[in-house]
Each structure stands twice: as C-alpha cells, then as structure tokens.
C-alpha cells in the first residue's frame, strides 16, 4: 500500500477512535472507551509494523 494512503487511513482511524473514546467516555462506559481507543491505536501500529501479504508469481 502506498505511503500516502497509509497516512490517510491512519489519520482517519485515529480520528474515529478518538471520537469514539471521547463520546463513549462522556456518555457511556469509560472501560469501553478505553478498549476502543486502544484498539484504534493498535490497528494503526499493526498497519505500519506488519508487511502486506504479497502474491507469489507462478513459474511456467
């Protein structure tokens, strides 16, 4: 995946996770907010750390 797409997906994931954390902490359960916020951070880190699966080319 190109770097500029990874940056956009990371930013959107962190914004969504931050919004979830804010509203869940404000109006809902604080423990659920913490799990959702940590999950968003984990998803971004995992996207940058682990490589993509590549298809192997067939030999003829």
Image (spheres, rainbow, N blue to C red):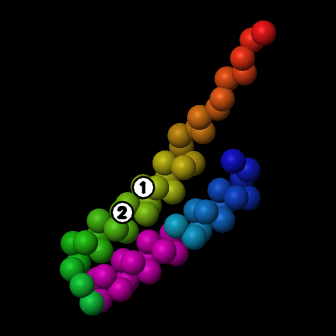
Find disc 1 in the rendering and name its residue. Answer: 42
Is residue 17 part of the magenta span, yes or no? yes
**Disc 2 to disc 1: CB gap under 8 Å:** yes
Q: Position of residue 9 (x, y in %)?
A: 61, 63
| Picture quarter with the C terminus | top right
Q: Position of residue 35 (x, y in %)?
A: 29, 65
Total count of labels: 2
What secondary structure prevails in the magenta region?
helix
In the figure, is residue 30 to the left or right of 11?
left
**Residue at 51% across, 57% down:** 44
Q: What is the quadrant of residue 11 in the picture?
A: bottom right
In the figure, is residue 47 to the left or right of 54?
left
Identify the residue at the far front of this view: 60
Find disc 2 in the rendering and name its residue. Answer: 38
Is residue 18 part of the magenta span, yes or no? yes
The magenta stretch is: 14-26
Image position of 44 with respect to 37: above or below: above
**Residue at 58% across, 62% down:** 10
Image position of 28 with respect to 55: above or below: below
Q: What is the quadrant of residue 33 in the picture?
A: bottom left
In the figure, is residue 7 to the left or right of 47?
right
Q: Position of residue 15 (x, y in %)?
A: 52, 75
């Amino acid at each position: 995946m190109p770097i500029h797409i990874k940056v956009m997906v990371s930013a959107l994931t962190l914004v969504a996770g931050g919004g979830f954390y804010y509203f869940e902490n404000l109006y809902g359960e604080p423990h659920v907010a913490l799990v959702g916020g940590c999950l968003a951070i984990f998803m971004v880190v995992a996207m940058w750390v682990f490589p993509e699966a590549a298809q192997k080319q067939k030999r003829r």
